[in-house]
Image (tube, helix red, strand yellow):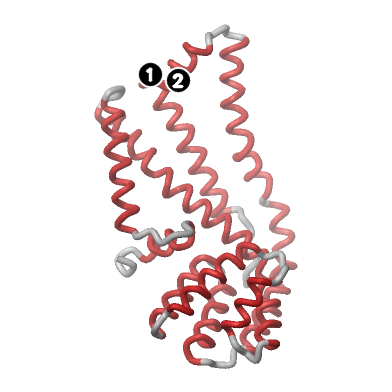
Amino acid sequence: QADSNPYLHNLLRTVFKKEVKPAVFLAALLMLFLISFAAGMRLFSAAAAFLAALMVTALPLMLASAKLEGDRTRSSREGAGFVSELYRQYRINNKNIYAAMEKTAESGGDFPICKKYSSRLLMRIRSSGSEDKIKESTDQFAFALGTVWGHMLAVCINLAAARGTDVSEGLADIVAQLGKAKERAEERKRLNSEAARMTVFLIPLLYVGTMLISLFYLDVPVGKLLINQFTTPEGLIFFLFIAFMLALNMLIIRLVTNVRIDY
């Protein structure tokens, strides 16, 4: 399953705390689609019900992808501090990568996302019985970070954990490169923040504003407004379309405008 659905497999392992198999997740999405389609058939035509069910089913995947991209952006900004601390602990603990990762997770450094991912990785590689399993775990760690330096760090951890290779020079090089990349990212960060704020705050405020206008200026009773919005075919399909487009816009903004510190 992991080989046939590598992206979905890594996405689920990154977003959820507990192991969720792709087949189980896809079965849940199929069930959600069938329930949404059956409910939609009572209100819409077959084509409209199918479209509404597709939008409802797509939302969990879009939200999971948006969370992944948000965590990748935050972890990229934590990278310099996290790798510096890992390198320091690696040198202190006689180049024992397991001890270095454990001490880094216990440190007071301000890199919560990287700590979370590295703690999960540490548990997985400690329970791994082969180099292939360690490689699979470090590849998933690189996927979670989604950066060039994350990939290089995963390679270093894999070599140190599976073969006992000294990766001091590799870690030191990542620290140096991240320091330079952080300076370049600050300017891009200022240019990309406006679009995200407009999408996250303006669209919900506009929706709430139209509801308030209907209540206080058009004198539409609350009960009738809710009935028209959530029980009529037109009102419900427009609400689902608004929710779908909001989620889609948030995902696109994260993919296009979020600044990652990378090299």
- Apparent side of residue 184 relative to residue 234 in the rendered image (left or right): right
Residue type at tag 2: Gln
Tell me which residue sits at (53%, 77%) in the image.
154
Q: How many marks?
A: 2
Q: In the rendered structure, are the residues bearing label 2 and label 1 in contact, judged by CB atoms less than 8 Å apart?
A: yes
Q: Within 10 Å of the Cα at label 2, are there few (<14), some (14-19), or many (20+) other Cα atoms?
A: some
- The percent coordinates of residue 119 (x first, y second) are 56, 70
Where disc 2 sits, the SS reads: helix
- The answer to whether residue 141 is above or below residue 233 is below
- The answer to whether residue 83 is above or below residue 91 is above
- Apparent side of residue 176 relative to residue 130 in the rendered image (left or right): right
- Apparent side of residue 140 relative to residue 22 in the rendered image (left or right): right
- Structural distance between the alpha carbons of marks 2 and 1: 6 Å
Where disc 1 sits, the SS reads: loop
User: Quadrant of the image for the N terminus?
Assistant: bottom left
Q: Nearer the viewer, residue 181 or 99?
A: 99
Mark 2, residue position: 229
Mark 1, residue position: 232
- The percent coordinates of residue 92 (x first, y second) are 70, 87
- The answer to whether residue 190 is above or below residue 123 is above
Tell me which residue sits at (62%, 9%) in the image.
217
Q: Within 10 Å of the Cα at label 1, are there few (<14), some (14-19), or many (20+) other Cα atoms?
A: few
